[in-house]
Image: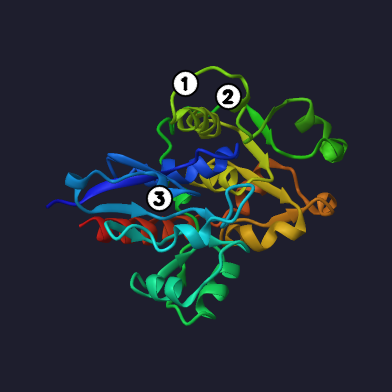
């Protein structure tokens, strides 16, 4: 019986960055079935479908927004063949002996960030630093480079710290789903379409300034200059970006050189390409 492919979807929450991770995974497969990240057991695998491969690149919070779900959802259905890669395991993930034994069956576990890596290794599970799969996204319009500057999910109270020439020419975007609130029926996978529209903007941008990991990493994949500015208390989740670019806190504005050539010069393209190669190799070997 042949192995078919599944894909993670996001029924709950409004963060389109989550969906961007699945768009990255979808480059490698033709999914026939979708599993909600927080409640994968709610997807019933038809008896005749056989084994389903599933790329597990996700932020595993262990919650559905209100209630803990990790313990009731892990281990996954035995018919799911998982590739644990580019995974972040947050505080809601409890590791019982059964779950540890389950993860050890699929070693090594690819962790998106060093915080998750140390957490998994401390459990006696073989793991490695994989970084984020969104670095493998493809710019489908590489020759289309415009003058658009996008500021994505930066708090309004720091706008005054931007240089006038950036602020006056910027368009402000968010990774919080707008479509989730407009009550228009678009089907269960509408967040994929909404996230794709954002990615297409980043592909041709002159500059992107963001507090969102899954905005910054796609920009690096697209060869789009990007500056990451965020809250220090979240850096444990996004330190994977340090492989490619500086990460700034909102207190660091004075140390940022806003010259576009300076921003470009600080991007470590060698590491970008190295990580792309590693991740693509891991995915292709898994899918053989």
Q: Relative to residue 172, is residue 277 depicted above or below? A: below
The residue beneath circle 2 is 179
Secondary structure found at label 2? helix
Exactly how many numbered labels are in the figure?
3
Determine crowd level at label 3: few under 14, some 14-19, many 20+ residues with C-alpha closer than 10 A: some
Instruction: Judge by depth and name the residue closer to the eye, 104 or 203.
Output: 104
Q: Relative to residue 109, is residue 224 depicted above or below? A: above
Task: Tell me what residue is drawn at x 43 percent, y 34 percent.
Answer: 142
The residue beneath circle 3 is 41
Label located before the other in sequence (3 or 1): 3
Image coordinates for residue 218, horizontal then vertical, percent: 51, 44
Q: CA distance from mark 2 to mark 1?
A: 9 Å
Are the residues at dot 2 and dot 1 in contact (C-beta closer than 8 Å)? yes
Indicate left or right for 219 with 237 as reference. left
Quadrant containing the C terminus in the rendered view = bottom left
Image coordinates for residue 158, horizontal then vertical, percent: 84, 40
């Amino acid at each position: 019986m042949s192995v078919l492919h599944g894909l993670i979807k996001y029924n709950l929450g409004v963060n389109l960055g989550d969906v961007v991770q699945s768009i990255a995974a979808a480059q490698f497969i033709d999914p026939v079935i979708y599993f909600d990240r927080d409640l994968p057991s709610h997807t019933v695998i038809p008896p005749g479908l056989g084994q389903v491969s599933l790329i597990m690149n996700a932020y595993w919070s262990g919650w559905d927004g209100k209630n803990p779900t990790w313990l009731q959802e892990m281990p996954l259905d035995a018919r799911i063949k998982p590739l644990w890669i580019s995974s972040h395991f947050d505080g809601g993930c409890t590791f019982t002996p059964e779950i540890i034994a389950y993860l050890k069956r699929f070693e090594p576990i690819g962790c998106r960030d060093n915080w998750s890596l140390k957490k998994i290794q401390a459990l006696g599970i073989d793991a490695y630093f994989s970084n984020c799969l969104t670095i493998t996204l493809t710019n489908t319009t590489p020759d289309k480079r415009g003058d658009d500057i996008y500021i994505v999910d930066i708090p309004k109270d720091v706008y005054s710290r931007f240089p006038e020439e950036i602020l006056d020419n910027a368009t402000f975007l968010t990774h919080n789903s707008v479509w989730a609130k407009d009550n228009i029926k678009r089907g269960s996978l509408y967040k994929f379409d909404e996230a794709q529209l954002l990615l297409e903007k980043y592909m041709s941008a002159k500059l992107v300034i963001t507090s969102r990991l899954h905005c910054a990493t796609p920009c690096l994949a697209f060869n789009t200059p990007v500056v990451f500015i965020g809250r220090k208390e979240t850096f444990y989740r996004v330190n994977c970006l340090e492989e490619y670019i500086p990460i700034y806190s909102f207190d660091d504005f004075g140390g940022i050189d806003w010259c576009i050539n300076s921003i470009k010069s600080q991007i470590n393209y060698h590491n970008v390409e190295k990580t792309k190669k590693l991740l693509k190799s891991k995915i292709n070997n898994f899918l053989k």
